[in-house]
Amino acid sequence: MNRNKLTKLTIENANLLLLSSSRVGDTQYLQHALAMIKAKLDGVNELLFIPYAGVTLSYDDYTTKVQSALAEVGIKVTGIHQYDDPITAINKAQAIAVGGGNTFHLLHQLYQNKLIKPIQNKVAEGMPYIGWSAGSNIAGLSIRTTNDMPIIEPISFNALQLVDFQLNPHYTDHNPAGHNGETREQRLAEFMVLNPTTAIIAIVEGTALDIKQNTIKLLSGLPEMTNDANGFLFKASKKTVISPDDNLDYLL
């Protein structure tokens, strides 16, 4: 595969919840996202969890962590690593969740286990897909706008391509005093120079993209964040604020 070329795949009627993060502020793990997750599953009570982004956390421990968080809304969680055949696990899943961690390791494992196409096929059938952090990164065209260190080299940077744009979770342009490195905005500007026609949606902590029936909406996980729950659209060297009131359907 050519890792430098974005080959686009259009999936109609994808049913996605792409969270910036698993926490916001001092909230407990996934607490701010429980209502959004429950709504996205819409009656589905069993979730296949993909813990491949975990590196310093074992897959068993990671799955247990997610199960503990989602027990409050009556969701049963099973880790894909617990199955002898991960492809069969995907094919039988009612819904999939992909957690955060290292995006490069996550994508490497998806390629190693030959799961890219099976996940794309299930999403094309309408199966709910929920991701946070790295799990949201891989829903885009490629992982070339991730914040992570490339600790391992996937065979391609092309991702699941469930949407027709790039993602940048955990977005912030904060630059600590005395730090002389590039800001996030400057890094994304570099991408735009080389990819002027490709959009990037940057989602901030506590927010998510809700995608269903060919519509896309920015959501906030906390009521008190409603007025500040803005994200950002980067394209063609421009940065535009997006809000929960904006119609973003043209990006699909």
Image (cartoon, rainbow, N blue to C red):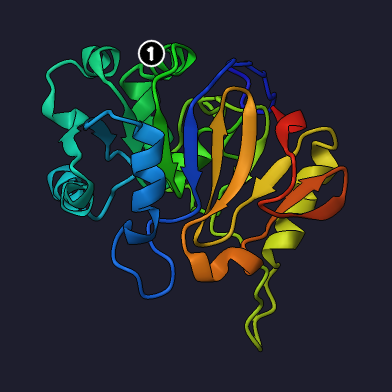
- Which residue is situated farthest in the bottom direction here? 177
- Determine whether 188 is above or below 9 in the image: below
Q: Is residue 192 or residue 139 the one in the foreground? A: 139
Secondary structure category for the residue under label 1: helix
What amino acid is labelled 1 in the image?
Pro
- Determine whether 13 is above or below 230 in the image: above
Horizontal side, residue 185 vs residue 92: left or right = right
The tally of labels here is 1
Residue at the (46%, 16%) spot, across then down: 120
Residue 61 position, x and y percent, is 14, 50
Label 1 Cα neighbours within 10 Å, binned few <14 / some 14-19 / many ≥20? some
Q: Is residue 196 or residue 70 the one in the foreground? A: 70
- Determine whether 127 is above or below 30 in the image: above
Q: Is residue 83 or residue 252 the one in the foreground? A: 252
Residue 81 position, x and y percent, is 17, 30
Horizontal side, residue 161 vs residue 197: left or right = left
Residue 14 position, x and y percent, is 53, 22
Residue at the (21%, 29%) spot, across then down: 80
Task: Residue 42: name its quadrant.
Answer: top left
Residue at the (56%, 18%) spot, across then down: 13
Q: Is residue 14 or residue 156 the one in the foreground? A: 14
Q: Say whether residue 219 is visible.
A: yes
Name the quadrant of the C terminus.
top right
Name the quadrant of the N terminus.
top right
Residue at the (30%, 38%) spot, across then down: 52
Residue 207 position, x and y percent, is 53, 55
Which residue has dot 1 on it?
Answer: 118
Q: Say whether residue 105 is visible.
A: no
Task: Residue 63: name its quadrant.
Answer: top left
